[in-house]
Image (tube, helix red, strand yellow):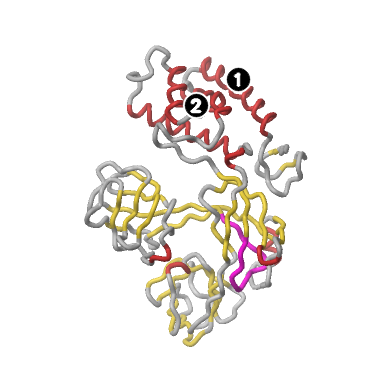
Amino acid sequence: MQWNFGDIVGYIKSYISPQNTSTAFSAADNLLLKNLVNLYCEEASINYPINELRVPDYFIRTYDDYSTGTLTVVAGSADVTLAGGTATFKMIGRKIRINGENTYYTIINIDGAVISLNRTYLGTSGAGITYQIFDNTYDLPSDCVWVKKVYVLSTTYLPLKEKDWDFIEVMDPQLVNTSDDPEIYCLPGNKTRFEPFDGTTYTAGVSTTTSVLCTSLLANDTIADVDYYKDWNLINVTRGLSSKVSAYNPTTQTLTLVEAIDGQTTGDLFYLTANRKQISLYRRLTSQKDILVKYYKTSNKLVNDYDVPLIDEDFREWITCKVLVVWFSANDTMAAKYQAIASAEDLRLKNKYGRKTDSSVREGVRKKTGRMMTLRIQ
């Protein structure tokens, strides 16, 4: 039997208010209930190897080093000026090494020929200075919650081993070691991107509606980057509301939103942000190379009553009880009752589905990973 968002919300309401499941809930109550359902759908997708969320493929193409032209640098300044080359907004977040020094900086903004660094330049002032812009860290898809395996495609699916970030820090803190193929990978954590990059806001342009925002100010304005802002979060500062971006049209310079922002109109102030898990490769690649990442993804966010979750109806009782524990948190007796049922459901689901764990943990072996005690059964 297929279930949808409206089914699970109505089912939970029948436990909260058995006599009336329609008029007894305020708009705030409904919003809280829906947010809790989404929260525990995501928790289930993180903890269990659910078939619909199993191991999709994601491809990363590494960057060429860029070193065209020269720099003018000033000791003690965080801005350097490029001559004879072209800096693009895509370089924001990458690293730069100046004059072959064993120190690298991170690019935090591009303004024409001016490249802003994350800290002041520690070397000697000068012009005609050589440089390298490179990267060893790449974003993973927004729905990735756990990496299973990483392969280098150009060498007949060479599998890479996972290591801690501390290993790379010890082996190569300056990121100078290069190779035709990486040897290992690590997952250093999350990275948050903002636009505008200077921390200010953009202004919504003419023809903006509650579900479509028009602007000519975005750094990304090329046809080739039509998906660049997909899955970013748009924060409408004027309304105090946010929504995820479902599509970007660089021709009309419009952002389409997953959920309409009530009252949004021309002149509203907004900014964009994206939070991505990341993968780092060691040794550092200096040319384009295709990397295959197989991962588990998180459950899709449910918005409309007819939206179908990617997790099986088998999780309905578990989600219901988890929601009711929070809902009845002020009632010790009721909260304890549903917590006991949730714990029993959790045990049942673990026995049926097994549990996801780090890719470095062998099948069916318990091991403390530093994040949680895990057991994987397949």
Distance between the Cα atoms at labels 2 and 1? 13 Å
Q: In this picture, is 126 found above or below 267?
A: below
Contact check, label 2 and label 1, Cβ < 8 Å? no
**Magenta stretch containing residue 228, yes or no?**
no
Amino acid identity at mark 1: Ala
Kindly indicate the quadrant of the structure image that contains residue 216: bottom left
From this viewpoint, which residue is outermost toward the top? Answer: 19
Where are the magenta residues, as a range?
A: 278-291
Q: Which residue is mark 2?
A: 323
What kind of residue is marked 2? Val
Q: Position of residue 74 (x, y in %)?
A: 46, 80
Residue named by callout 1: 340
Q: Residue furthest front?
A: 1
Relative height, residue 86 to residue 52 (above, below): below
> What residue is shown at x 67% (from left), y 65% (from top)?
282
Does residue 15 appear left or right of residue 169 in this picture? left
Residue 19 locus on image (x, y percent): 39, 12
Q: In the rendering, at what x and y percent does residue 84 appear?
A: 44, 85
Left or right of 186: which side holds 196? left
Q: Position of residue 10 (x, y in %)?
A: 43, 23
Q: Does dot 1 land on a helix, a strand or a loop?
A: helix
Using the rendered view, name the quadrant where residue 260 is placed: top left
- Number of numbered markers: 2
Disc 2 is placed on an element classified as helix
- Categorize mark 2 by other alpha carbons within 10 Å: few (<14), some (14-19), many (20+): many
Up the image or down, 339 lies above or below 40; here it is above
Question: Crowding at label 1, few (<14), some or many (≥20) Cα neighbours within 10 Å?
Answer: some
